[in-house]
Image: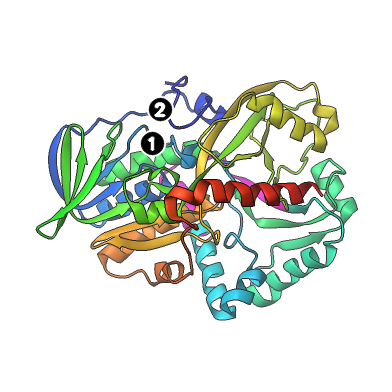
Amino acid sequence: MTDWQSPIAPGVSWYQATVGERPSYPALDGSRSVDVAIVGGGFTGLQAAYTLARRGISVALLEAYRFGDGASGRNGGQFGTGQRAWPEDLEAKIGFERSKALFDMAEAAKHYLLDFAAEHDIDMEYMPGQMNVSHKPGHDKEYRANAEIAAERYGYPHLTYMDRAETAERLGSSHYHCGVRDTGTGHIHPLKLLIGLARAAQAAGAELYEMTKVTGLRQAGGKTILETARGSVSADRVLLATNAHVDKLEPVTAAHVMPIGSFIAATEPLDDHPRVLSGGEAVADSRFVVRYFRKTRDNRLLFGGREVYSSKNPEDTANFIREQIVETYPELKTVRITHAWGGYVGITMSRHPFVREVMPGVTSIGGYSGHGVMLSNYCGKLYADRIAGAAPELDGLEALDVRGFPGGRRFRDPLLFLALTWFALRDRL
């Protein structure tokens, strides 16, 4: 159904409108017993299910709505490079050795995902290139150093510094002051990847269930039982891959991973505006409330730039984002917006992924903080590798200091609203 309206995400996305009929999967009906049960049908859960099934481990995945209704099927589609923080900033906190290991892990994630799509013949509309740009003057030194450090200390030669003139030329806009261009990464149609991933997981033998909300977890006899309205699943191990949508299911995850609404608009094809991102790269800027945009294969501009720190969806998303588009590209003032949508991403206090055993035999992975297209897929694979015997790379994420929000789940929303509103104000100054 191209007009499917998700109960957990406002608007019908351009992604959904361009994939045709999405495959559907049955709801759970009855009781099952498997080696591993997974809650959440996004990239993390589906990659774990795929890898486990390929290894001959019985696995059942339960999704409350439809696969891709969360951030995995509705995000900005940008790969990025490294972790959420620049490697030099991460290095200052945890040292070079650990920072380099996490950078290398992210590079492995990038190559794994490209290889996975090629192996399974998934046309995820990959387009090369990304630019990170500064919305304020005076940051030339940091951006120049970022490119140099990546090459000299992290073995990544694909970043080049852009001065203001080059930044303006490549963006087709004089709104930004400098930046770095990354030719070693790119951007994709995330829902096409997710649909192909679900097919691959099912073909490998994973049991996939949609419209099956897990209402409770309990442990008995060394097993964890997932309760639903129409049956239960008993498993030796459980992966919680709910990210922003854990709700009240599991309190430790809820205290560490907070949902933030992020909203995107798609324009009509920009055939009359060839200067806009003429090289086809994606862009993310330096605001705390990041603005991110890119061109699609059919020449539309997808522009994301509104975050909401509550469960209330904003009104008139299209016109709000139009204002931000026009700040960057005044010539697009009258361009028609064809789609506007939102979704919820999971963030952590440190903006590092949350990886933790939250109950005996129950692991929770999420909180990618807007940097999850590659990491979520790879973390799902690494979880499955760990179940099968070894995955030392996951240990590096698990060792990161990811603290809970002050006051836990009850007070995180108002406190974080105040903090992030302050940072958003700083973006404007």
The stretch drawn in magenta includes residue 116:
yes
Q: Residue at x 69, y 63 (%)?
A: 158
Provide the secondary structure element on which disc 2 rests: loop
**Numbered tag placed on residue 67 in the rendering:** 1
Q: Amino acid at mark 1?
A: Phe
Provide the secondary structure element on which disc 1 rests: loop
Q: Residue at x 37, y 32 (%)?
A: 66
Q: Residues within 10 Å of mark 2 (few under 14, many from 20)?
A: some
Q: Is residue 113 visible?
A: yes
Outermost residue to the right? 165
* Residue 356 x/y as whole percent: 37, 63
* Residue 55 x/y as whole percent: 25, 57
Q: Nearer the viewer, residue 8 or 71?
A: 8
Q: Between tags 1 and 2, which lies in front?
A: 1
Q: Residue at x 56, y 68 (%)?
A: 103
Q: Amino acid at mark 2?
A: Arg
**Numbered tag placed on residue 22 in the rendering:** 2
Mark 1 vs 2: CB contact within 8 A: yes
Q: CA distance from mark 1 to mark 2?
A: 9 Å
Q: Residue at x 46, y 56 (%)?
A: 407
Image: 375 above or below 279 = below
Q: Nearer the viewer, residue 52 or 405?
A: 405
* Residue 284 x/y as whole percent: 69, 49
Please provide the residue range marked out in magenta. 111-131
**Numbered tag placed on residue 301 in the rendering:** none
Quadrant (top left/top right/bottom left/bottom right) for the N terminus: top left
The stretch drawn in magenta includes residue 189:
no
* Residue 201 x/y as whole percent: 31, 44
